[in-house]
Amino acid sequence: MTQPAPTAAAQADGHRAASRHAGPAGIAGWVLFDWSMQPFFTLVTTFVFGPFFAARVAASAADGQALWGYATAAAGLVIALMSPVLGAVADASGRRKPWVMAFGLLMAVGSTALWWAIPGTPGAVAIGLLGFAIGTIGAEFATVFNNAMMPGLVPKERLGRLSGLGWACGYVGGLISLVLTLGFLSASPETGRTLLGFGPLFGLDPATGAGDRATGPLSAVWFFVFVLPMLMFTPDRPATGLGLRAAIRHGLAELRVTLAALRRDERNLMRFLIANMIYTDGLAALFAFGGIYAAGVFGWTTIEIGIFGILLTITGTIGAWLGGRLDDRLGSKAVVAGALTVLIAATILIVSIDGGHILFVLPAAGPVPGDGLFASTPERLYVALGCVIGLVSGPMQAGSRTLLAHLAPAERIGQFYGLFALSGKVTSFAGPLAVAFVTDISESQRAGASVLLAFFAVGLWLLAGTAARRA
């Protein structure tokens, strides 16, 4: 026998409970969620395990890149389809923490499995792809429910600072985990030494990529350690009393109402979600191809690309922290619009650089073998522009998360953060596909990268037409 939907009085009690803001320990616990989850994205997805899989687990680098892309797309499709549904169910059931932990556990299971993706062993490719896809689904869904907790933790006028602080904290966690991995765990199979010149800790065998594979279990352990303050101290919404089956039915019914209202009455919010979809695609592609562009134009090695990534992470941390303060002072929309404007200018300048020119026509001596790290003027300008991109990308993403809290109805915030996750994933292939297609037909990396200008410009135009209805 199913239980009835919560009464108006029960919902009002829940909303009053949710409106009691968190104390310092509760806020710190929520912020640490970003710290706890970021190593999965930094170590597994971007800098360590992904390149290791393509280079050493798959049959060839081309096969590895293609397979990794298919796994990413498959995980993205699941996330896109299920995020709004799960957000609606969470709104119906009330509590968010159980969902965060359930999907955090899924991330941990998937990432831990990566330890068994040993090059040359049977099933290594399947284990790597399946573990990565499962881990990605868990990490993204856990983030949806963590985001949905944010509006009830602080007054509305402090949401920007809270979101920016969380994003900055995540960047720091990713940076520290990356430095620890590159400096002490992941070693070159040729030299047996890490980036800092040490032998890998715990006797990890470079010949089998043990340090690279260890990023999976490390991400899982890191999550369980640093998510504890959120579980212990951050207040959650009270349970509505609905059982899981009833919550699913009620949540799906509410989602249908929300989607109908989005088309009929929430045009402003729908415009923002479309804008977020487009400029998020552009930013994802910019990061995905930044290292590839530098490798092709300047001949950068893994070490140079790794140092470049560390610099971007540092500036991203600073930008997210400062952006949160600007968010509360100027408004989320102004911060996101300003970041997009800077991204447009930076992208124009990036495509103006090649190995022997800057600003399209000004000659500049390009890199030569043995000239040192970032020795040429085009390289230094590229690094500077990369740091600028890092500086504004954090505020753009944190500001978007905050802006949704000002646009969406409070009683359906979980659903709308699910739709927010959907808008960031449903066309995530579009940016990379556009860059690849234009690069292919033009045979020019610069032409391919220039297509990202359209993503940022269209996103900015759509964003300009939105207005927060609540302070």
Image: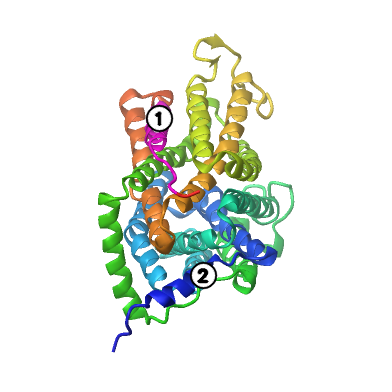
Which kind of residue does numbered mark 2 sit on? Answer: Arg
Asked which quadrant contains residue 229, the reply is bottom right
- Earlier in the chain: of badge 1 and badge 2, it is 2
447 magenta-colored: no
Which secondary structure lies at badge 2?
helix
Q: Percent position (x, y) of residue 304?
A: 62, 36
Quickly name the residue at label 2.
16
Residue 124 placement, left or right of 26: left
Q: Which residues are magenta?
A: 448-469
Nearest the eye: 33 or 412:
412
Q: Please determine whether, in this image, residue 446 is positioned above or below residue 136.
A: above
Q: Residue at x 31, y 73 (%)?
A: 250
Q: Residue at x 39, y 57 (%)?
A: 416
Q: Percent position (x, y) of residue 327?
A: 58, 43
The numbered mark at residue 457 is: 1
Nearest the eye: 354 or 275:
275
450 magenta-colored: yes
Residue most extreme to the top: 362
